[in-house]
Amino acid sequence: MESSKSPPEASGPASLPSVDILDDAAVWTPEIEYLVQAVVEQIRLDQPGMIVNGPQRNGKSRACGYVEAVLADCVGYPVTTFTWTIPEAVAATTRVFIQERMLQSGCNAIGHRDLAVLRNRLINHMTERATADGAKRIVIIVDEAQNLGRNDYGALVFIFNELERRRLRPFFLLVGQPELGKLSQQWVTEDAQQMVGRFSTRTHDYLGIRLDDLEVVLAGFDDEEDGPEATAAFRTAPTAYAEGWRVQQLAPMMRDAVRRVAAAQNVQEDVRLPMQYLRACLLSMLYRIVQRRMRPQVFQLSDAIDCVKSSNFGKVLQYYVRTGVGTGGELRGTPGTVGGGASAFSEHIEPGSCPRRATRVERGRPGGEAAT
């Protein structure tokens, strides 16, 4: 039987890292590659918008930042991108909705009673940003879009029309939880072509991470673009890092540990790992290495199982299986459809045109217009 007491790197008390082990920047994943390619495809087809939906904690918000950071490079021409986040449904007026979108766009001149003035300021600000970027295409990423109300959609239609009137080409990327995908199906049932044609010409399922992809995903945490000191492996075990150890070498044990935890719950499906729980599993493993002064090269499966359990993924695993988005077999939506259908891309892909790590996105470009 394997022992969980791995040989230490050195004797004496462990010294914890002085910075977070994992950088806050989004890392490349196959799911992000699928998402970026789907968005680029829709933009190149001059579609007005699409829906991205998936269960909570799958990393959708982090993926929004990734898309914002790389989209112009992947499309191949200038794109101005705004990211808006919708709070949980409250009894907010259209005026408040526009003010929040102004602030999230970097326009601080929200002090006016007249809704028409506020809307005009927002459109002016977005237009000026596009002009400064040399862009005709404006992409508006709406995160937590399941919280949008009927009046909010009316405001989005107005913004879309006004941007078009100024000879700009808007694209709305609505990102949210599974109920957002159900809303698009409801629009089809109600024959609400105004909404389908603008916001859901394509519905894309954002899934968890395949266990077979853990090596390439974990490799992203050791990106050396900012120097060795920024890598997870160096921050965890500098000596082992110098010997060639990298965190992706933990992938086989993480994969086996997740499968064993799933099997203990009689789950037969090939479970996908949501990004939040992947990070939690990895952090648990790395801190165990640090605190026990282990040589990471001899980290054992019994340790990995303990770390998966401490991440609490086992407590929510059944939810991700039950939702149907997060297991290994479902199909993605295709252009011109809502919901399922064969994917335009293969189920497993290698890194393509998307960079392996996205830099932090400067949300809202602070320092916009002064309040009046």
Image (spheres, rainbow, N blue to C red):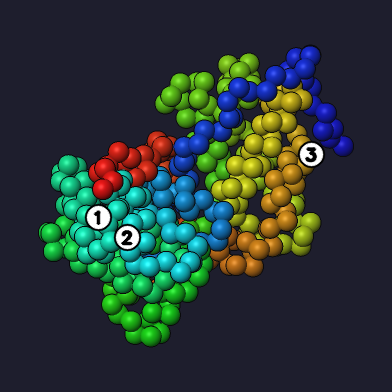
**Extreme-top residue of the structure:** 11
Give the Cα distance between marks 2 and 1.
Answer: 8 Å
Q: What's the residue at 56%, 58% (across, down)? A: 56
Query: Closer to the camera, 272 or 13?
Result: 13
> Are dots 3 and 2 in contact, CB under 8 Å?
no
Residue 122 is marked as: 1
Q: What's the residue at 60%, 51% (across, down)? A: 273
The answer to which image quadrant residue 55 occupies is: bottom right
The answer to which image quadrant residue 122 occupies is: bottom left
The answer to whether residue 120 of the structure is visible from this angle is yes
Q: Residues within 10 Å of mark 1 (few under 14, many from 20)?
A: many
Q: Earlier in the sequence, mark 1 or mark 3?
A: 1
On the image, the x and y values in percent for residue 84 come to 37, 54
Query: The residue under label 1 is which amino acid type?
Result: Leu
**Is residue 294 depicted above or below 258 in this figure?**
above
Query: The residue under label 3 is which amino acid type?
Result: Ser
Query: The residue under label 2 is which amino acid type?
Result: Ile
Q: Earlier in the sequence, mark 2 or mark 1?
A: 2
Q: What's the residue at 29%, 53% (across, down)? A: 111
Look at mark 3 in the image and give the residue it sits on: 302
**Extreme-bottom residue of the structure:** 190
Look at mark 2 in the image and give the residue it sits on: 98
On the image, the x and y values in percent for residue 183 come to 44, 74
Q: Which type of secondary structure does the marked residue at label 1 adopt?
A: helix
Left or right of 294: which side holds 35?
left
